[in-house]
Amino acid sequence: MSYLAHHRLFDPFKMILPVELVSLLVVHGGGLVLDLSAGYLLFFDVTRPYGIFFVSYFHCMNSQLFSIGMFSYTMLATSPLFCYPDWPRRFFARFPGFLGAVLPLTSPDPQPSTSCLYSEVSGTSSGRQESPPAVRNSKPRLKHKLRAIFAIVYILEQLFMPYSHFITQGYNNWTNGLYGYSWDMMVHSRTHQHVKITYKDGKTGDVGYLNPGVFTHSRRWKDHGDMLKQYATCLSQLLPSYNISQPEIYFDIWVSINERFQQRIFDPRVDIVKADWSPFRPNPWLMPLLVDLSPWRTKFQEIEGSLDNQTEIVFIADFPGLHLENFVSEDLGNTSIQVLQGRVNVEVVEEKKNHTLEPGDKIQVPPGAYHRVYTVSEEPSCYMYVYVNTTEAALQENFTKLFELQERVRNGTETEPLPPELQPLLAADDEDVDATDPVVKLFLKRQRRMKEVKKRREAGVLERLERFAVKKYYSIRRGFLMTAIALRNLAVGLPPVEQLTREVAFATMKGPLGEGSQDERLKDEDGHTEL
């Protein structure tokens, strides 16, 4: 939520307020006021137009700020439920008469329905035109009573669901409740630092590792025990076709909730395939949230604020008797571990050396090698990784020098002739030149991309509207086609893999690329590995 104020939708507010106040007053304060007042604004006749305007504006912004599927559009479509039943007739009756041929029917007046109940004495206090005499039900029948009972039971169920955690205990994790049935939307944020899936052949004992995204595109299983159990069961059924008999599946998932330290959410020593799980009992292989270390979050913010732009930091908490196996990339040439609480042993695998660290101790770990951090204290340990991406820092320094050189060449202040490998810097931004030096090649590619991003962000309203329409078209198209493929597969079975691959590729075809991010990390650019 703290980054929403930087979105272009809030640019009008940033013309009169700084970003910090936009985040405080508009994003958080405005959202709180709207949540507390929207229901009352929509309920009363006098304030309903204002309520519909503000909630419609709110839902339209949500559709652009968050990836929440059809939720925003569903809420927009259901907003008229707060109006009188005859609002479409009264609305279209305001249009000129020559448009009557293309507009919905506005007459005759609504007729009585046998599904409704009417009072025996019709009142005229509302000033509305009376309907013509007709047979009206004034006493409830059996169907009316059944519908009323169903509506009451449904409302009570919706009120009870957020408080049903004591029944559905198997779905409780660090935060209680069935996924999607709790009143905690956007209250909790999670980040995943480390996810490892280990399989073991039940007959041969061979151990291997799986890509966390194999066989699924969903990421929710990382936070929900019931989904993790389903994923493990699915893997146990698929791996035998890859010559892995009676597979055992172990998950080592590190999660940070609400900007706490990274810690395990599930026990990595438990075979999830054989693990016990019930929707009505607490999950026995769920690791507890280390709330005793929560006061460290203030210290974390102080430490992060004291670092320069090139230094990164990750806070880790672990349980006694467990260890973290980690690999330091060769790009991270300056990586250290510092203990904040507890006692740990750091084992450098290649050197076959152990180092015991107490609170305040610090050790440098070599890049391009594995190491293990064992928690040997009786209480949970808390330590931090401090590292600098030396490759990226050197690349940024080279980019700065190339940019300054390019500016001097263009304004005529550079007197020295450029060597052949730097000649591509003389080309115009829209020219596609073949640079031989990998750093120059990556620099020119980045310059072109930043220019394209700037052009897209400065585009006019019509161009932005066109991009929005194209994006929504491909999104809706994908939904319809994938639904049709799924229904076909359920009805007649799976087609050959080649055919299914072609169908899915056609259904998920995307339009023009969306707006990029200027802050995208350099390591994600093509060509970085060549350095």
Image (cartoon, rainbow, N blue to C red):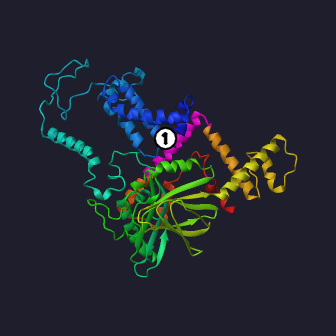
Q: Is residue 51 magenta?
A: no
Q: Which residue is mark 1?
A: 64
Relative image position of residue 515 (x, y in whole percent): 58, 45
Q: Is residue 40 visible?
A: yes
Q: Quadrant of residue 239?
A: bottom left
Relative image position of residue 374 (x, y in whole percent): 48, 68
Q: Is residue 464 magenta?
A: yes
* Placement of 162 over or under 101, stated as above or below: below
Residue closer to the observer: 455 or 312: 312
User: What amino acid is labelled 1 in the image?
Assistant: Gln
Q: Residue at x 68, y 50 (%)?
A: 446
Q: Is residue 217 visible?
A: no
Is most of the magenta stretch helix, strand or loop? helix
Horizontal relation, residue 121 to residue 183: left or right: left
Q: Residue at x 17, y 21 (%)?
A: 122
* Placement of 81 over or under 393, stated as above or below: above
